[in-house]
Amino acid sequence: MASLLKVDALTGVTTAGSISVTGEGNSTTTNLQQGLGKAWINFQQKSSNVVRDSFNHSSFTDNGTGTMTFTITSVMANINYCHSGMAGEGGNSQECLSQAYTQTAPTTAAAQYVNAYANTSLEDPSLACRVLHGDLA
């Protein structure tokens, strides 16, 4: 018989914000809090700047072709958070590389990104997604 659990909050016993989840085969545990994405965004920059959906992002700034800055609502604990993402342009056989902009250091509240083809030409993507993992302040 299936069970249903409904709760409004989960709290760890030892540390309120830390909950361990046992992995397959009872071999390892994962910290639930550490494994969650802390911010994400799905956007287009091609013809106009459109945020389709997001979590923990307060603004999007177009810095010119292929570059943008996202401001985070609940800031990160430090600048060592992990960036991952993708970008692409419909109708073009080449996919863009979406990465953190290395000439501008991230802050705990914002990060700048660049989208470029393999030949290094910058592109405003029609679809791009970005996820941040790390510790919130």
Image (cartoon, rainbow, N blue to C red):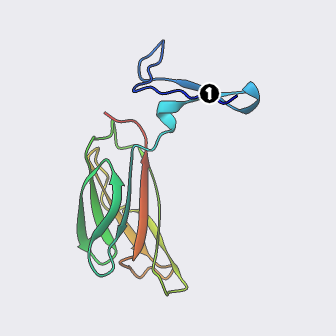
Query: 39 or 54, which lies in front?
Result: 54
Question: 98 left or right of 49?
Answer: right
| Location of residue 26 with respect to 71 vertically, above or below | above
At x 28%, y 41%, the residue is 75
Query: 52 or 99, which lies in front?
Result: 52
Query: 11 or 82, which lies in front?
Result: 11
Quadrant assignment for the N terminus = top right
Question: 46 left or right of 10?
Answer: left
Residue 99 lies, in percent from the top left, at 43, 63
At x 35%, y 66%, the residue is 43
Quadrant assignment for the C terminus = top left
Residue 109 lies, in percent from the top left, at 26, 46
**Residue placed farthest to the right in the image?**
25
Total numbered labels? 1
| Location of residue 6 with respect to 102 vertically, above or below | above
Query: 109 or 127, which lies in front?
Result: 127
Q: Name the kind of residue labelled 1 in the image.
A: Ser
Which image quadrant is residue 108 in?
Answer: top left
Question: 112 left or right of 31?
Answer: left
Residue 4 lies, in percent from the top left, at 57, 29
At x 47%, y 32%, the residue is 33
**Residue placed farthest to the top in the image?**
14
Which image quadrant is residue 53 in?
Answer: bottom left
Residue 12 lies, in percent from the top left, at 47, 18
At x 27%, y 72%, the residue is 49
| Location of residue 90 with respect to 36 vertically, above or below | below
The residue under label 1 is 3
User: SS at mark 1?
Assistant: loop
**Residue placed farthest to the front in the image?**
1
